[in-house]
Amino acid sequence: MDRRSLRRRILIPRIGECRPPPISGYGNRPTRRFSVRGGGHNRGNRNRQGPRSIRPWVAARRHGEDDAPMPGLLTRYVAVELLKTILVTTGVLVTVIAFGATVKPLVRNLLGGFDIVRYVGLASIPMLQYALPFASGFGATLVMHRLASDNEVIAMSASGLSYRRILRPIFYLATALFLVMVLLVNFVVPIFFTKMESMLAHDVTRLLASSVERGEAFDLGDTRIYADQVLVEDDPEEEEVHRRLVLSGVAAVQVGTNGLPETEFTAEYATLDLYKVDGRSILKLVLGDATVFRADEETLVRMPAAEPRAIDLGRRLEPGPKMMTLPRMLAIRGQPLEFWRVQEHVDQLRVERSMELLQSEIKRRIEETGVLEFEDPGRDRFWRLSFPTGWDQGGDSGPVIRLQDQGRTLETEVVGFDWLVVTRDGGAVVDIEIDQNLSDDPDEEPMPRTARSLRLSDFSGGLDSSISSEEVLEWATTSDQEFSNEVVGKRVRQRLKEVENVSNRLRWDIDARIQQRLAQSVTGPLLLVLGSLLAIRLRHATPLLVYLVAFLPAIADILLISGGEQSLRDGPSVSGYLLLWSGNFLLIFFCISAWWRLSRN
């Protein structure tokens, strides 16, 4: 049915179905009128109760209810017009915002070809949480302003419809929009956010290749790499290799814990392989025909192949609370030790435990057997240290050291010997320093003065994955007398405090994220209702001016929600909750004010 036919059915009801308002002075008592029916005048049949069509209207008004002809038709008509306009405005707004989201990846040369279209498609769904509230408010403003400016709202009111009945489709759509927003922000958007990040971050080799093509060096962990040219192999022969980069004209520098260069590599070519192990991204660099300079040994060696330490990029694809669905957030909040960010700090405690066990094991072997055996897998060396009875670290006499280096065996008695347990590459290792007291020239001495990153033979290192996080935390909460020295105990207490702080921040972040999603879900329905009320109230103004009046409080609402979320992430506070919800309270105030002014007429 077109709009003209609908208006005719509203304004010109059938004879005998008119519903006039009660005459002033008579209260709710109906007037005495003849009921006119088809077939002639029934003069002898006076109805003292009024026309049969008026009686239901009088009874409804007496009980404070609304009644009107064709309520279902009006509801469907207004609802369909609203839905069509909202869908069109949402599609346009989402497309614009989604293309805007691709600017940063395009500038960084992370997208190309069909990936752009795919990324825009993935970004369209998360952008709905921002576009849908504004599109619904704009669509409601356009539809209701047209109805009001064409006097169709007045026609509905003159036909016996109250504003509550006229705006009933708006309230229905607002309720549906709230449910859609709740499902969208809590279940759908996190999944697509994860896919977007995965599309950009799963292939770190593309970012590295882009740096090489721009002639820039790139940093990976403690290693800086520069190359003249790069070739990407999407399907390497090895099954465990996810992707491979073939580099030419390579120079790499490994930096130590003190920030100074530790090892320098130069090579004609190199391969950089990306591995995926338990959700972690690990890069392995292999240099062919390489020249290696080690600063600690002051040696320059030419090798057919050199393999620096593997580079662990961590769990870059592990989602944070922003990319978690509501059930996942609630599960992580109850078990924070399962979250990867907390687990990283627990792993640091695990390393402290490994260092403590390694130090105790070295002391035990020196006291009981007087023999220590170390492995240097990076240089294919084996060290054997034989200590005299009653040897004490820092004494005047040292052990007898035997070094096996690539089939060559060297043995000498040293004057002094020092060892230190350190953590490197996520594990506990030993650094040794020997004093041969033979000359000031290291080249004349039978073996190197220092050795780094040695591993104690027949020792697992205390990094057994079967040890649960709860057991590690229980070990960390023991008394200070259980540790080898006060420094270790202080360091363990600091690590334990970091675990507690990260767990608390995780809970605060989840609580703030839940409040932000709920407040954002309420914004859409409020903006829809506010746009409709203002369109009727300001029917003589232009639609854009009406929407601007509703748009400015909505922008303030989004900013206040974001500010309140950031405040709650630092800890729960009354001011944070008030700040987060104050924007919605502002929209509610405007809705009540517009409704009150409208109902006065």
Image (spheres, rainbow, N blue to C red):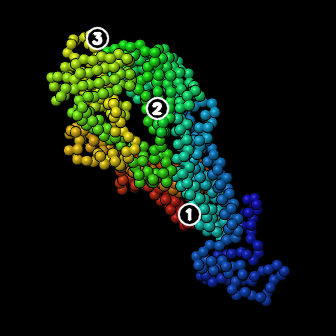
At numbered mark 3, what does the secondary structure look like: helix, strand or loop?
Answer: helix
Q: For mark 3, what is the residue?
A: 443
Q: Residue at point 15% right, 23% down?
A: 396
The span from disc 2 to disc 3 (Cα, nearest Å) is 37 Å
Residue type highlighted by circle 3: Asp
Looking at the picture, how far across and down is residue 309, in whole percent?
Answer: 41, 26
What is the number of the mark on residue 282? 2
Residue type highlighted by circle 1: Leu
The span from disc 2 to disc 1 (Cα, nearest Å) is 65 Å
Residue 8 occupies quadrant: bottom right
What is the number of the mark on residue 100? none
Residue 431 occupies quadrant: top left
Residue type highlighted by circle 2: Ile
Give yes or no for contact between labels 2 and 3 (Cβ–Cβ under 8 Å): no
Q: For mark 1, what is the residue?
A: 598
How many neighbours does mark 2 have within 10 angstroms: few (below 14), some (14-19), or many (20 or more)?
some
The C terminus: image quadrant: bottom right
Looking at the picture, how far across and down is residue 218, in whole percent?
Answer: 45, 24
The span from disc 3 to disc 1 (Cα, nearest Å) is 96 Å
The first of marks 3 and 1 along the sequence is 3
Residue 365 occupies quadrant: top left
